Image: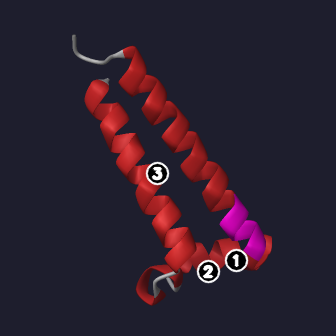
Amino acid sequence: MFYLGIGLVLYAILVFWITLAKPEKIWNMGKIQAFIKILGSVGTQIFFYIFGGAALGFGIYFLIKHWPA
């Protein structure tokens, strides 16, 4: 579970970076464009922030709970 926590924290950082930087190749992918059609641009950003925050929260929880002694 410790390694899952590390992975979730890294994943959250990646999601935050993608949301802030909006790299062309990633932001123009079909799935993200579908989110933009449904939620709008700001709604998609908010969704990614919430998703990244949840991943970060669970990652920190797993790191604290299963820190190797």
Quarter where residue 64 is shown: top left
| Between marks 2 and 3 in the image, the one whose residue lies nearer the viewer | 3
* Residue 20 as seen in the image, left or right of residue 7: right
Instruction: Name the residue beneath numbered marker 2.
Output: 33
Could you say whether the residue bearing mark 2 is in a helix, strand or loop?
Answer: helix
Residue 53 shown in magenta: no
Toward the top, the furthest residue is 69
Local packing at callout 2 (Cα closer than 10 Å; few below 14, some 14-19, many 20+) is: some
**Percent of width and height locating residue 2:** 29, 25
Quarter where residue 66 is shown: top left
Toward the front, the furthest residue is 69
Which residue is depicted at the point 54% across and 35% down? 57
The range drawn in magenta is: 42-46
**Percent of width and height locating residue 51:** 60, 50
Q: Earlier in the sequence, mark 1 or mark 3?
A: 3
Which residue is depicted at the point 71% across and 62% down? 46
Res. 28 visible in picture: yes
Q: Earlier in the sequence, mark 2 or mark 3?
A: 3
The mark found on residue 12 in the picture is 3
6, 27: nearer the viewer? 6
State yes or no: discs 2 and 1 in contact (Cβ < 8 Å): yes
Mark 3: which amino acid? Ala
Dominant secondary-structure state across the stretch colored magenta? helix
State yes or no: discs 2 and 3 in contact (Cβ < 8 Å): no
**Percent of width and height locating residue 58:** 50, 32
Could you say whether the residue bearing mark 1 is in a helix, strand or loop?
Answer: helix
Local packing at callout 1 (Cα closer than 10 Å; few below 14, some 14-19, many 20+) is: some
Could you say whether the residue bearing mark 3 is in a helix, strand or loop?
Answer: helix
Residue 44 shown in magenta: yes
Does residue 63 sit above or below 7 in this rendering? Answer: above
